[in-house]
Image (tube, rainbow, N blue to C red):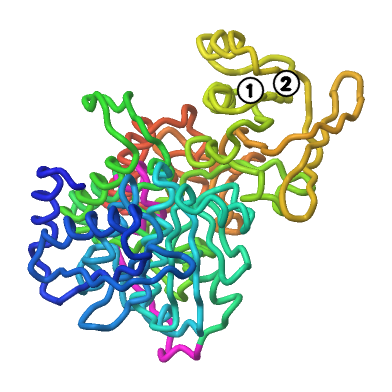
Amino acid sequence: MLSADIIAQVKQIFAPLSADISFRLRGPAGTDETRRMRGFLDDVASCSPHLSVEETADDGPDTPRFGIAVGGRDTGVAFRGIPDGHEFSSLLLAVMNASGLGRNLPDESLRRRIAALRGPADLRTFVSLECTNCPDVVQSLNVLALLNPAVSNLTVDGAVEPAQAEEYGVQSVPSVFLGRELVSVGRVGLSDLLLKLEERLGAEAAETAEPEVRTFDAIVAGGGPAGAAAAIYLARKGMHTAVVAGRIGGQVKDTMEIENLISVPLTTGPQLASDLRTHLESNDVALFDNRRIVSADTGGPVKCVTTDSGETFEAPALIIATGASWRRLNVPGEDEYIGRGVAFCTHCDGPFFAGKKVAVVGGGNSGVEAAIDLAAICEQVDVYEFLDTLKADRVLVDKLHTLPNVRVHLSSQLTAMTGDGKRLTGIDVRDRISGAETHVEVQGVFVQIGLTPQSQPFAGAGLDITRGGEIVVDSACRTSVPGVYAAGDVSNVPYKQIVVAMGEGAKAALSAFDDRMRGVTV
């Protein structure tokens, strides 16, 4: 099933393997699905003498499936469906991590939290092989299973188990279930997944005395294009620098095609994120990803940020480059039905709504692009825009108006989302001119109203912040607090673009270095 080129690449990846790892396949004997999975696993196993396949006849539920065992011990990592497409990387990383290798294994601080998680925790993660957010979640959950024997994670391809996805009420991926309880939906990092499980399962008392305090010359909060550029520039100036972030790449990882990064005609978000990490690792930068910053103290000469792992990072200079996230409508029913009809990514979740009636909220580029994508598979698409005109580029608007199954509603405000307790069934819309309220039956709503700056952890740090949540900076990326700088989408710089964020990150780093050299009091 794997091409000769892919097998050659996987052989290089698996060259460092030293532990004996087996794929334990369970499935009905002689079926086409079992044979396909066996052929796939045989191809992967052929890439290393340390890999083997064990097959057991089993026509029970969730079969055919396979798990990963190391030295004869099950790791708790299993797949229902052949993990190709975007999930092929999840399989490769699971094998590497099971052998103690792989660069996405967390550091000691997170390992202690993972080991302390109480079980049993039998997780089930529904994915789509076309979803670019799913691998991050699957890989994080697999790490939890590998490091805590009380945790297991079964990754289920929703296309292979459509009836089961329907039974669980899955309408967005990735969807993570603990038993029958929906724990998480959509893109989320290891730290946040761990926190969600700690809240539900509890954790043993940590075997560590005092909270860790790490000291640097500069701290960069955020690992996207702005944060990476800032850290690299700081390191090249000889400053001992830490990057504290949820994930390296940030929002970029959710973008499939990037054609406007000058000198790079075409790349993808995941590839750019990987390149950013490689560039960071080639410099003297300490990476602390899988963290969520919960508070900051910028009142003295030493700036401090604290993470959800209890660590404190201290430095005379702090560059905030935490980026932005999808903006919510904050209307009744939105939180309740996220993952059960309310979605944000058409690429990942659009297929769940094939042949159905959906709504898109937002008339900017992202909203109109979403409507065009959905029109190809949905029975009807209604676009609701708060203003009296669509804000998208003319070429997109012209394309939208050629689609017979798309209707545009201007001066319209979505006021509530309704459902039957299990999934979304409709929306309430108010006409902003007449004031008339209308209930519209839809099976899905895609919220496309832009991004909100991730400045919340710094709200009490004395910084000037706009009503929209953007940190105010001057032309040199300095904030209202000496020694604190901001760059990229979290700041009030216009034009939220990758190339702009990179330039702003470099500018913030140069300002921090210049202030250090000039002995500016912070």
- In terms of image quadrants, where is residue 113? bottom left
Placement of 336 over or under 59, stated as above or below: above
- Residue 489, given in percent of the width and then of the height, sits at 47, 39
Query: Can I make out residue 522 in this image?
Result: no
Q: Magenta segment: does it hold 222? A: yes
Say if the magenta span includes residue 119: no
Question: Horizontal placement of 376 versus 103: left or right?
Answer: right
Residue 222 % position (x, y): 40, 52
How many other residues sit within 10 Å of disc 1, few (<14), some (14-19) or many (≥20)? many
Q: Is residue 298 left or right of residue 144?
A: right
Which corner quadrant of the image does residue 403 belong to? top right
| Left or right position of 374 against 231 | right
The answer to whether marks 1 and 2 mark residues whose Cβ atoms lie closer than 8 Å is: yes
The residue at the point 39 percent across, 41 percent down is 252
Q: Quadrant of residue 202?
A: bottom right
Tell me which residue sits at (8%, 62%) in the image: 15
Question: In this figure, which residue is indicated by the disc labeled 2?
Answer: 387
State left or right for residue 317 relative to residue 119: left
What residue is pinned by disc 1? 363
Q: Mark 1 belongs to which amino acid?
A: Gly
Report the residue at 31% width, 49% height from top. Answer: 84
**Amino acid type of disc 2?**
Leu
The answer, for residue 196, to whether it is visible in the render is yes
Q: Which residues are the magenta region? A: 204-228
Residue 486 image offset from top left, x and y in percent: 44, 45
